[in-house]
Structure formats: structure tokens, C-alpha cells
């Protein structure tokens, strides 16, 4: 069953967000919200603006125009306060390679002021089935192990909103299924809100309460997976993706 909330204030409120790089417009006036405890899927082909959007939400890239508010606060003026309650995981980022897995998690815990560090690390290591490589030097991790480490880093800080960019792309089906279950469990237990990108259409349907589809920096479709499929008269979300990506 989908989780709902009586709270009216969104956790994330994006209005008319635009980012230009010279003459190229990567993100073109997009607006969307995420409610407390909601999982919003963001779909789109490569180059559609997904990564640039996430970078702006993390304060890594400055918008050309538009606004970003989280927890009722403006990101531009309350950056540190907001980002203490946010985390991010992606298949495409790495951690300091000379540290062990556990050392990396300790560094993250201290940067975020996590209380009960030992217990929290034990919990996240167990949940992500990382015991066998807990003491391994990070540069020796496989791609799937690195993905689990970046997810562990993100969950360790107990964020209120989590940005996930292709979080299961390098995982085997069993671990990927467990990760999806873990994320839903965290949402149910703490009201965690999630923005989720993936090229796995079945995963997007299973995980997302709502989906927005980006194409050339604009939102061209928004709704539940079923609503989007029905709107475009296709058999499933993958057929919609192919139709929009080829236009």
C-alpha cells in the first residue's frame, strides 16, 4: 500500500528551475514537488537533464533561474541547514579509495554528526549484507560492492530526503531486490522521501508513487506509471520511454 501524509507542505518544492551552460539549456523551467514519505521517479534518456537537476538539488550547480525549497527553506539561503538532512547515492560516484569500507563510513558519520556511530554502522552493514567486505580497502571493491558502500553512506546519516541516481545499476537481481525492499522499509519506518532515477522500467514502476519524464530539459509527462502508460496508449512504461526518447 502506498504511504500517504496529511502534511500539506512538500519536503521538496522546485519552481521554474532552469540551468543554461552557455547557449545550451540543460534544464528548462521545470516544476515539481515531493511530499513527505513519497518516492518520485525521474525518467528520461541520457542528456535529458536528470543529473543536472540532481546536482542543483544538492547545491553543486547553481541554477540560472528558478527556486528550490526543502523543508520550507530556500536552498540558496539555508544551504548548510538543508544539506545536513539530505544525502545522495549513485552508481557513478566513488569514495576515498585508500580507506577501508568501515573507515569511509566512520568519516561520513562524523561529518554528519551521527550519534551512536558504532551501532549505526553495524546496522547499515548488516542491512546491506556488507559484512564480508567491511574491512576491505575501497579501491579493491567490485562495482556492486561500491554501489552498496555509497548506499550505506547515504542511509547511515538517516536523511529526510534521499536522491538516488541509478542506485541498483551494477547490482545482481537478488541484491537489487533487497535494496528496493530496504528503501521501502526506510520510507515506511521514518517517512523518508526519495527522488529516484533508473533506466530499469520495472523497477521504476515498482518503486515510484509518481513519475516525471524529462525530455530535452523539460517535463513532458507526469503521473503514476499507470496514468502515463494510459495517456500515451502504450503497453507498458518501457514502450512509453521508447516512444518519447525517439521523438
Image (cartoon, helix red, strand yellow):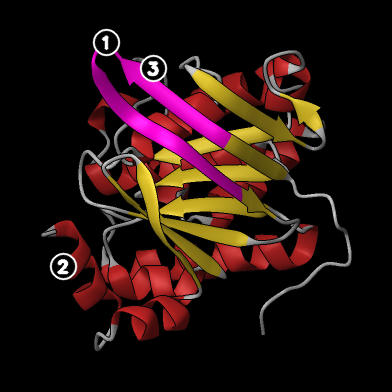
Q: Earlier in the sequence, mark 1 or mark 3?
A: 1
Q: CA distance from mark 2 to mark 3?
A: 37 Å
Density class for disc 3 (Cα within 10 Å; few <14, some 14-19, many ≥20) is few
Q: CA distance from mark 2 to mark 1?
A: 29 Å
Residue that badge 1 annotates: 22
Identify the residue at horizontal 20%, vertical 44% (top origin).
46
Figure quadrant of residue 172: bottom left
List x then y, in percent, for residue 203: 37, 70
Task: Please report contact status of discs 1 and 3: CB closer than 8 Å, yes or no.
Answer: no
List x then y, in percent, for residue 206: 45, 76
Tag 2, which secondary structure? helix
Q: Quadrant of the N terminus?
A: bottom right
Q: Which residues are magenta?
A: 16-32
Residue that badge 3 annotates: 96
Q: CA distance from mark 1 to mark 3?
A: 32 Å
Task: Please report contact status of discs 2 and 1: CB closer than 8 Å, yes or no.
Answer: no
Q: Earlier in the sequence, mark 2 or mark 1?
A: 1
Amino acid at each position: 500500500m502506498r504511504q500517504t501524509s496529511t502534511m500539506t507542505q512538500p519536503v521538496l518544492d522546485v519552481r521554474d528551475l532552469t540551468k543554461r551552460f552557455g547557449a545550451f539549456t540543460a534544464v528548462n523551467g521545470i516544476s515539481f514537488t515531493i511530499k513527505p514519505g513519497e518516492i518520485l521517479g525521474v525518467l528520461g534518456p541520457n542528456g535529458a537533464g536528470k543529473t543536472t537537476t540532481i546536482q542543483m538539488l544538492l547545491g553543486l550547480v547553481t541554477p540560472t533561474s528558478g527556486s528550490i525549497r526543502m523543508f520550507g527553506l530556500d536552498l540558496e539561503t539555508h544551504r548548510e541547514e538543508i544539506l545536513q538532512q539530505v544525502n545522495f547515492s549513485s552508481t557513478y560516484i566513488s569514495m576515498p579509495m585508500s580507506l577501508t569500507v568501515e573507515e569511509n563510513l566512520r568519516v561520513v558519520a562524523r561529518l554528519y554528526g551521527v550519534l551512536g556511530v558504532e551501532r549505526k554502522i553495524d546496522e547499515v552493514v548488516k542491512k546491506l549484507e556488507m559484512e564480508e567486505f567491511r574491512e576491505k580497502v575501497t579501491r579493491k571493491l567490485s562495482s556492486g560492492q561500491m554501489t552498496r558502500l555509497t548506499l550505506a553512506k547515504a542511509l547511515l546519516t538517516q536523511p529526510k530526503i534521499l536522491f538516488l541516481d541509478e542506485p541498483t545499476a551494477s547490482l545482481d537481481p537478488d541484491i537489487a531486490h533487497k535494496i528496493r525492499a530496504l528503501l521501502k522499509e526506510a520510507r515506511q519506518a521514518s517517512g523518508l522521501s526519495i527522488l529516484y532515477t533508473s533506466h530499469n522500467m520495472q523497477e521504476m514502476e515498482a518503486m515510484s508513487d509518481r513519475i516525471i519524464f524529462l525530455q530535452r530539459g523539460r517535463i513532458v509527462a507526469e503521473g503514476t506509471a499507470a496514468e502515463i502508460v494510459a495517456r500515451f496508449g502504450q503497453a507498458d512504461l518501457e514502450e512509453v520511454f521508447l516512444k518519447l526518447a525517439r521523438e
